[in-house]
Amino acid sequence: MEEIFKTHYRQLWISAYRMLSDQALAEDMVQEVMTRLWQMDNLNHVRTNLGGYLHRSVINQCLNKIKERKRWSLDEDPDQPDPGQERNSKDINVQMEIEQAIQLLPDRCRLVFVFSRYELLSNQEIADLMEISIKTVENQMTMAFKRLRGHLAHLRT
């Protein structure tokens, strides 16, 4: 288990962080997935593609957390910058708007977009990982770009 953790932790954490934009929460998501793996009685169905299984599990865990956040986000101020960042306020606001726009994408569309643009996976790799056709990946990316352009049109000026 220690070897699995050392081998996969960093890449899983990066994926979780890109989706959640929160270092501690990304750690929690990866640790929850690793704990569930450790508690499994039978790992035979996972051994053939352990990395893919772990990655998909972390993505699902993050999507669940995002859904949970949306339910409770009424009390939060989305325009409040992260105090740990040392960029100027304009850069912070633009980055936050982009991240918020990505979060507004439908779940499958957002996942395809994150895999493509943040994880740098090819359309074929995304299709294989998500068990969908390449055409569906292409359609989801087209939809993502169209929606993001709409949400972020005011930034082009």
Image (cartoon, helix red, strand yellow):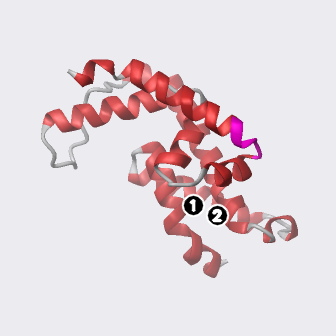
* Residue 56, horizontal then vertical, whole percent: 67, 52
Image point (39%, 53%), residue name: 23
Quarter holding residue 3? bottom right
- Amino acid type at mark 2: Met
**Residue 83 x/y as whole percent:** 21, 44
Q: Is residue 130 left or right of residue 140?
A: right
Q: Please state which amino acid type lies under the numbered disc 1.
A: Gln
Badge count: 2
Q: Quick check: marks 2 and 1 in contact, CB under 8 Å?
A: yes
Up-down relation of residue 46 to residue 21 (above or below)? below
Q: Is residue 118 left or right of residue 89?
A: right
Residue 119, given in percent of the width and then of the height, sits at 51, 54
Q: Residue at x 62, y 37 (%)?
A: 138
Main secondary-structure element of the magenta-colored stretch: loop
Please, which residue is most extreme toward the bottom here? 3
Label 2 crowd bin: few (<14), some (14–19), many (20+), radius 10 Å? some
Question: In this figure, which residue is indicated by the disc labeled 1?
Answer: 31
Note whether residue 108 is visible. Answer: no
Q: Secondary structure at mark 2?
A: helix
Which of the 4 image quarters holds residue 157? top left
At 43% from the left and 26% from the top, the residue drawn is: 148
Look at the image and say whether residue 19 sits in the magenta stretch.
no
Q: Is residue 1 visible?
A: yes
Residue 34 is marked as 2
Quadrant in the picture for the N terminus: bottom right
Please, which residue is most extreme toward the left here?
Answer: 88
Dot 1 alpha-carbon crowd within 10 angstroms: few under 14, some 14 to 19, many 20 or more: some
Instruction: Give the CA separation, mark 2 to mark 1.
Output: 5 Å
Q: Nearer the viewer, residue 110 or 85?
A: 110
Magenta span covers which residues? 131-135
Establish if 27 lies above or below 100.
below
